[in-house]
Amino acid sequence: QQQVKQSPQSLIVQKGGISIINCAYENTAFDYFPWYQQFPGKGPALLIAIRPDVSEKKEGRFTISFNKSAKQFSLHIMDSQPGDSATYFCAAMRGGSNYKLTFGKGTLLTVNP
Amino acid sequence: NAGVTQTPKFRVLKTGQSMTLLCAQDMNHEYMYWYRQDPGMGLRLIHYSVGEGTTAKGEVPDGYNVSRLKKQNFLLGLESAAPSQTSVYFCASSYGGQGRPYEQYFGPGTRLTVT
C-alpha cells in the first residue's frame, strides 16, 4: 500500500521555468509533509516542510502548496536553475510514529541551460 | 562534525555471502534508520532504532538484521545475500521531537551489488 503517491516520475524544465511536482496522501493522521532533495551520489537532504494547518510555505524559490481537503501537496520551484537538477522526494510523517518518514517514489528533475 | 558516515561506500558480494554495513553519527541523535533506494521505488525503510539497545522493523525488513549497541552506531547485516538485495543503502539519524521532527540527516550511501 503506497501511502504517498508522487508524480511525475521525471521532469525536464528549461532554465528560468517553473518546476512543479505533485504528491497525494491517504492517511489523514500525517502531521508533517517535508520535501527532500537528493543530488547524484549523495544522500537526501531536507529542503522544505509544511504542516497541514498551513496552505502555503515559501522559502526562497521553493514553495509548498497544501490542499488538505484534496489530500494533496506540491512543490513549486520558481526560476528553475541547472543547479536544481536533482531527485526530489515528498514525504509524510505521523506524530507518535517514532518520527518515521513515508516517502514518495521520487521525481528526477532536469533543468536545461 | 562529520555528520552521518557510512562504511563501506561500495561492495560486491556473491549470493549467499554475508556482510555488515556500518553507520556512525556524531550528533548525539536518538533515532537512526536504514533505508534502501531502488530505481523507481523511492526510499524504503528497512529497520530503525529509537535509542541505544533498541531496534524495530520497518517496511522491508526481510533478509536484514540490525544492532545498536552504541548510541552513535547502527549496523545493518545481511546474513545470506541475494541478488534482490542489490541496492543503494542509506543510513539516517534524527533528533526526534526537538525542533524539526521531520528532519533526518542522511549518510552518503553504500552501493551494494550481489551477483
Image (cartoon, coloured by chain):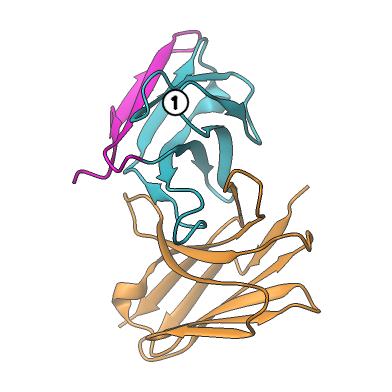
Looking at the image, residue A49 sits to the left or right of residue A16; the answer is right
Q: What segment carries the magenta color?
A: B1-28
Residue depicted at 49% across the width and 48% down the height: B96
Residue A79 place in picture, x, y as percent: 38, 90
Q: Quadrant of residue A93?
A: bottom right
Which residue is at the far left? Answer: B1
Q: Quadrant of residue B108?
A: top left
Residue B95 at least partly seen: yes
Which residue is at the far front? Answer: B98
Q: Which residue is mark 1?
A: B52
Q: Residues within 10 Å of mark 1 (few under 14, many from 20)?
A: some
Residue depicted at 42% across the width and 62% down the height: A46
Q: What quarter of the picture does the C terminus of chain A occupy? A: bottom left
State the cyan chain: B
Residue B50 place in picture, x, y as percent: 52, 34
Residue type indicated by callout 1: Glu
Camera-side residue of B102 and B46: B102
Camera-side residue of A108 and B18: B18
Residue B76 place in picture, x, y as percent: 45, 23
Q: Quadrant of residue A56?
A: bottom right
Q: Is residue B76 placed above or below A74 in the rendered structure? A: above
Q: Is residue B56 placed above or below A27 in the rendered structure? A: above
Q: Is residue B16 magenta?
A: yes
Camera-side residue of B65 and B43: B65
* Chain letter for the residue marked with disc 1 in the picture: B
Looking at the image, residue B112 sits to the left or right of residue A19; the answer is left
State the orange chain: A
Residue depicted at 44% across the width and 35% down the height: B89
